[in-house]
Image (tube, helix red, strand yellow):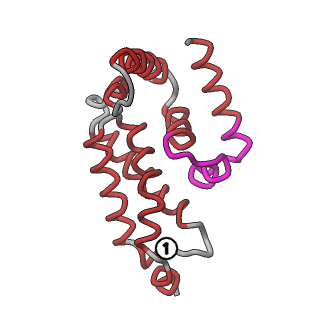
Amino acid sequence: MAWVFARALDWDALYADQLPRIYNYFRFRVGSDADAEDLTARTFEKAWQARDRYRQDLAGFSTWLFAIAHNVAVDFLRSRRHQVPLDAAHEFPADGTPEDDAARDSDLERLSALAAHLSDREQELIALKYGAALDNRQISRLTRLSESNVGTILHRAVQTLRSQW
């Protein structure tokens, strides 16, 4: 019965809608454009291969896709745990003057260094919230944390970053 749901989906529209969010999630988590592109492609490939197992009655497509993306990220980070510096965030594409670029690079470097001291769970929630632009309800479905717990953890993590800024 699950294949009926999967066949009814407009994969082209879903891909176009979800691509920027998935890419931004990975961009925040791994810091490298090339790795983010590879992991995004891997996520959509896995989703396409598993499309017959997607069940609309159990989760929205976005939730299902981010669960796949989360697993792809975990596998990637585990395989390169000692090689993935968070300070790679300085590679974000730039718009503006060289002075603006230097100030932004400095801020991103500082933010990456501060975020590196957060727990893996806090970093994951921040990536989902600010990198993938998911709301707390969507994050709670993905992480199996209560919505209020997600909000509390995010609030405390942001407060920690602000206090250290």
Closer to us: 48 or 121: 48
Quadrant of res 164? top right
Residue 72 percent coordinates (x, y): 37, 52
Instruction: Give the labeled residue for mark 1.
Output: 54
| Quadrant that contains the C terminus | top right
Does residue 120 lie above or below 62 as drawn? above
Which residue is most to the right? Answer: 148
Residue 101 percent coordinates (x, y): 37, 21
Would you say residue 133 sits in the magenta stretch?
Answer: yes
Residue count near mark 1 (Cα–Cα under 10 Å), binned few <14, some 14–19, many ≥20: many
Residue 5 percent coordinates (x, y): 52, 82
Residue name at image x 58 percent, y 48 percent: 134
Which residue is most to the top? Answer: 164
Would you say residue 40 sits in the magenta stretch?
Answer: no
Residue name at image x 66 percent, y 46 percent: 136
The image shows a total of numbered marks equal to 1
Report the predominant secondary structure element of the magenta stretch. helix
**In the displayed structure image, the side of residue 55 where residue 95 appears, left or right:** left
Does residue 45 lie above or below 37 as drawn? below
Does residue 32 lie above or below 23 as drawn? above
Does residue 108 lie above or below 53 as drawn? above
Secondary structure found at label 1? loop
Magenta segment range?
Answer: 131-151
Residue name at image x 62 percent, y 53 percent: 138
**In the displayed structure image, the side of residue 51 where residue 134 appears, left or right:** right
Residue 70 percent coordinates (x, y): 45, 50
Amino acid type at image mark 1: Tyr
